[in-house]
Image (cartoon, helix red, strand yellow):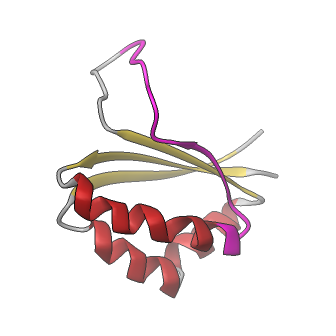
Amino acid sequence: MSAYLIALVDIRDPEAYRAYAARTPAIIAKYGGRLLVRGGETATLEGEPFSGRLVIVEFPTLEHVKEFYASPEYRDAKLLREGVSTARFLAAQGI
């Protein structure tokens, strides 16, 4: 059953964040993921306004999401966004 990684990211330094953004697609693909949403325009329909970056990635299973997030490759890439952004990552199993 598919699972989804949802990331809500507030970027403080767009230039520095680009290095992280350039590195992650290959890592996502290695763990079976497929980018569905990566930035772009969003609209808050209810609740607190959100003006950050929204990323949604589909993986084959929740286990794939966890393997991706815990992988050595992603741990190294994650260092590139630390200090230049604040993020909230969620994983959800699909229906």
Out of 73 and 61, give the one closest to the viewer.
73
The residue shown at (25%, 53%) is 14
Residue drawn at (43%, 25%), measured in percent from left and top?
42
x, y percent for residue 5? 56, 52
Residue at image position (46%, 34%) is 40
- Read off the magenta span: 29-46
Q: Please state if 16 lies on the left or on the right of 24 as rendered.
A: left
- Which quarter shows the C terminus? top right
Q: Nearer the viewer, residue 43 or 20?
A: 20
Residue 70 is situated, as x and y percent measured from the top left of the image, at 51, 78
- Pick out the residue farthest to the front: 15
* SS assignment for the magenta stretch, majority: loop
Residue lying at the far bottom of the rendered structure: 72
Q: Is residue 33 left or right of residue 84?
A: right
Q: Nearer the viewer, residue 47 or 50?
A: 50
Residue 34 to residue 37: above or below: below
Q: Residue furthest top?
A: 45
Residue 31 lies in the magenta-colored region: yes
Left or right of 18, for residue 42: right
